[in-house]
Image (cartoon, grey):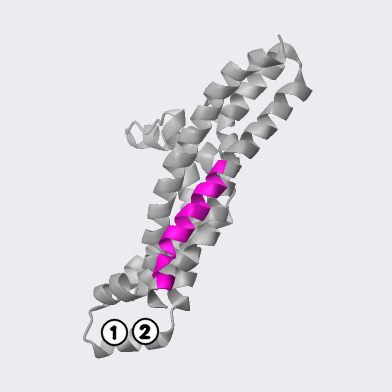
Amino acid sequence: MHWTEYFGPLSQGAWVTVELTIYSTILGAILSFAAGIGKTSHNPILKGISVVYIEVFRGTSLLVQLFWLYFALPLVGDAVGIDLRLPPVVAGVMALSLNIGAYGAEVVRGAIQAVAKEQYEAAKACNFTPRQTLYSIVLPQAVPEMMPPFGNLAIQNLKDTALVSLISLGDLAFRAEQLRNFTQDSTTIYTMVLFMYFGMALVLTAFMKLLERNVGRWRAVRR
């Protein structure tokens, strides 16, 4: 095969990688805010659930989490009489989302706790409820501080999608391995894959920078 013939299969795999990245990053961001805010909560149950989630998924390997969801979870379901078999794409998105969500939760927690205590005191003086304080005062100041770390996590998430090839999901890494086994042209195929991942990372970086500038406009307004 000529190297131009590799583009078709690799492009199909790249599209799967893009979809995985988008879905898992969005879901991971939701989990980040839920667990990050939960960890700062005064509710012991909510805080306990958040802490357990964060520590478990930050303290274990993403590969093991992926394998557990895809291979072990169905066995647990069989033991209790429930069908818990997940399609590869669902298992992949879940594993990536849960993992990035745990790391993002610490970013959210840190940004919330970095808001000056005077802001909380001012909210209390204005008789704001805890919910009003969080959504009207704390988060508008904390979110811009979260954006650079979130950008790094999104890039890491893109690279981590390659692991889903191990559960036979046809992403870029899986298509590359199929082509390599068929053609034995490892150098050309993996060089193309390298540049395709790099190109996707550049696009994602540019998008996150644009989002960071838009979210940070409140600074200019305050000035």
Where residue 10 is drawn, which disc sits there?
none
Q: Which residues are magenta?
A: 203-220
The residue sitting at 23% across, 79% down in the picture is 129
Which image quarter holds the C terminus?
Answer: bottom left
Q: Residues within 10 Å of mark 2 (few under 14, many from 20)?
A: some
Residue named by callout 1: 123
**Residue 45: quadrant of the picture:** bottom left
Residue nearest the observer in this picture, 105 or 3: 3
- Residue 72 in picture, x, y percent from top left: 48, 36
Callout 2, which amino acid?
Answer: Gln
In what element is the residue under mark 2?
helix
Q: Residue furthest right?
A: 187
Q: Position of residue 172 (x, y in %)?
A: 59, 28
Disc 2: which residue = 119
Discs 1, 2 touching: Cβ within 8 Å: yes
Determine the main secondary structure of the stretch shown in magenta.
helix
